[in-house]
Structures are given as structure tokens and as C-alpha cells.
Image (spheres, grey):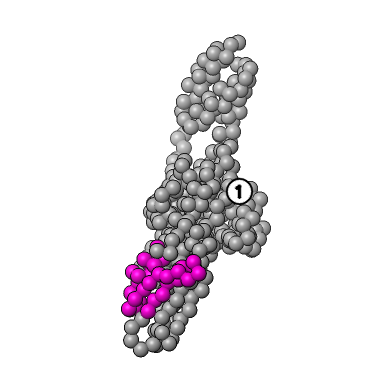
Amino acid sequence: MSKNDIMEYVEKKLHELQGVLPESIIEELYGKLKEIPGLTREEVDKIIDLAIREYRNALVEPGEAVGTVAAQSIGEPSTQMTLRTFHYAGVREFNVTLGLPRLIEIVDARKTPSTPMMTVYLDEEHRYDENKAKEVARRIEVTKVENVASNIETDLFENIIRIGLDPVMLKDKGLTPEQVLKVIEKMKLGAEEITLQYENERPVIIIKFAGEPEAAKLSKAREKIMSAKIKGVKGIKRVIVQRRSINGKEEYVLITDGSNLAGVLGVKGVDPTRTTTNSISEIESVLGIEAAREAIIREIKNVLDEQGLDVDIRHIMLVADIMTWTGKVRQVGRHGVTGEKESVLARAAFEVTVRHLYDAAARGEVDELKGVTENVIVGQIVPVGTGMVTLQMKPTVPKKSK
């Protein structure tokens, strides 16, 4: 049979699957079948039958305790995780928390990760050129006066502060002495005069103060000057440029020490559609709750994959759904998901039992015994599996046969 005849047969068979399989799976099947050379009708039938069987086997049975299965499926492999902090992608300067500590950070919905990091992707113009990638990195990385100063001296006799600038560091950071001078001039130091001079072709900024010399005043001004930001995005301490192969193409990607998603997305040269951070709370505040849900799934999956643990992604998706369905990210704990359960007994069974019972009694709460935990506590059949079905029979007096 010709290719066209087979494809017509495929289209006919797939059209019959409307309502049997989801549209996305039908489209995927069509794309896969289209790519296989030399297909016969019998092979098409077998492939479609196999797809239907696999799909039906993957469906959740009514009444299945999916929460318990998900908890066990993630909790049990977690006990095999390591407790170490690993070097990131071979870069010695950066550490990133992985394994069990990272998993705990995610499910606890910590506001700030212990090692905040960003993966910054670049736009079409900057991603293939190393020098252009470094330009973007310079725009993002916070540069302070102390990063470009070779030395800083305080002279009590003349009541001045002398800042010697390092020409090599200035060039590396893409700065000029005039830019540093402008930043210092804008600071409220109470200085009488601020000048830029050159000594042996090396730039020196001299800050002269009026009045009587005061050691404490000069020391305080010195600290303020050294920590002054010249340029960059707040919170980004360092940026490393890495070359990666993405979708078969080599491109440059920036890895940051520190995180500021809102600030970085506004930098020229950054691709905002792919740039991401390991801070779930930042993603929630900048991109919304749906993006936070995706980030939770991705981060948990990455932790498990890095440890070589095979956990079905649907279990992780259920955890992410539970953490985000109210419209904000909640931790899986007494201050979040568990602590906000409607059932008094379920809350009391987790932590601080007596306080939960006292509070519920004071408010006159009623437990409807609809969940699993509370029914286990009182010794009733749990509402999962066969326990979901209640059979009732109204006995009647049998009629006498004539």
C-alpha cells in the first residue's frame, strides 16, 4: 500500500478514537505514525490498540487513595537521598543545595532558598556570542566600589579619603573612573570636595571633608563608600557564563549566585520566556501561582532525577496542586496544607494535638469525618476504595406465591 493510503487509514482509525483518548494523545499518535516508514494496516491497528491499553492502565481507579500513594511514592525514595551540598555544574565558586535539604526547602515553601540561584537565558542577539553574553553578565552582576578599588586610605591629618582604582578591574567590569566618581558624588557623605586625579597614570578619587578630622566619621564614610553599588541587579553577587548545548545548538547561558527575577527580566539581552530561578516565592510574586506550580514540579523532579530516583511525575503534580490550589503557595505542614484542613482530628493527628483540640472545642467546631485520617482515628471504614460505596437495603416482606 502507498504512503497516502496508509495515512488515510490512520486518519480514519484516529477519528474513531474521538472520545476514547484525549485529543493531545491522538495528535501525538498521528505525529508518531506519520514518521514510521513502511507501515501496514495490521501494524497501525496494533499500535492503536496498544496506545488504548496503556492509556486505560494509566487511569486512576475511582476511590484510589492517590494522596497516600503519592506521599509513599515520594517519601520512601527520599530516605535514600544524600544530605550534602554539591558543587554546581563543575563551577567551584558556586554551591547549590541538592538532595533532601532541597526537597525540604521546596515542600516547606521557604521564602528564600539556602543557595538562591538563577539560570539566565539570552535573546537571539546575545546567546551565540561570548563577548555579548559577558556584556549582559556585567549588566546583571552587582559591582560595588570595593570591587574596582585597588586600595583605600584614610588620612586624618588632611581629613581625606583616597580611593585608588584598579584599571584592570575597571576594564573587566566595563566601567570608567568617571562613572565611579559620579556614584560617589551622588552619595550623602557631607564631603567638601570630591575630585578625580591620575597618579602614575592610575586613577585616584580624593574625598576631602570639611571641619575638624574625626576618625569615627572617616571610618563610617569609608565603609559606606566601599559598599556603594555602581551598577548591576540587586541581590546578584556573581555571574558565571557557561556554554551549553540546547536543542542541538551551542549557546551561552548565565548562572547567577543570588536571585532577583523581577530585576533580571528587565535587563537588555535577557530572554524573559526561558529565564528562571530556584526561588519559588519569587516566581509566585513575579509570574503568578500557575508558574509557581510549574516551578515546584520542575524543582522536585530535578532533585529526584539528580539522585537517580524514579518517581512518577503525577505524584509530584498532586503535591504541587495541593500546595497551590488556594491561589498562594502553602507549605506541607502545620502552617500550611495540614494546619488548614477542615477536619479537627486530622489537624490534631499531625502536630500539637492538645492545642488543636482545645481551639476546636472553644470554637465549637464539628468534624464531619469525611477524610481518611479522622476515620482511622475513630475506627471507621475510610472513604477510599470500597469504603466509598455505601450499600443500603430496605427489607420487604416477601409475597406469598399463589
Element type at mark 1: loop
Image vertical order of residue 359 relative to residue 119, above or below: below
Q: Which amino acid does label 1 sit on?
A: Val
Q: Which of 219 and 330 is in front in this view?
A: 219
Q: Position of residue 127 (x, y in %)?
A: 50, 44
User: Would residue 224 be seen by someone viewing this image from the given angle?
Assistant: no
Task: Residue at 51%, 22% (x, y): give it.
Answer: 14
Q: Magenta stretch?
A: 179-208
Q: Position of residue 233 (x, y in %)?
A: 43, 59
| Residue at the disc numbered 1 | 311
Task: Residue at 57%, 27% (x, y): give it.
Answer: 32
Quarter residue 217 falls in: bottom left
User: Would residue 270 be seen by someone viewing this image from the given angle?
Assistant: yes
Number of labels in the image equals 1
Residue furthest to the top in view is 1
User: Dot 1, how many residues are within 10 Å of its Cα: few (below 14), some (14-19), or many (20+)?
Assistant: some
Task: Residue at 37%, 79% (x, y): give it.
Answer: 208
The quadrant of the rendering that contains the N terminus is: top right
Image vertical order of residue 309 relative to residue 42, above or below: below
Q: Nearer the viewer, residue 354 or 120?
A: 120
**Is residue 213 located in the magenta-colored stretch of the structure?**
no
Task: Residue at 44%, 52% (x, y): give it.
Answer: 292
Q: Which of 191 and 386 is in front in this view?
A: 191
Question: Left of 356 or right of it: where is 45?
Answer: right
Q: Which of 283 and 169 is in front in this view?
A: 169
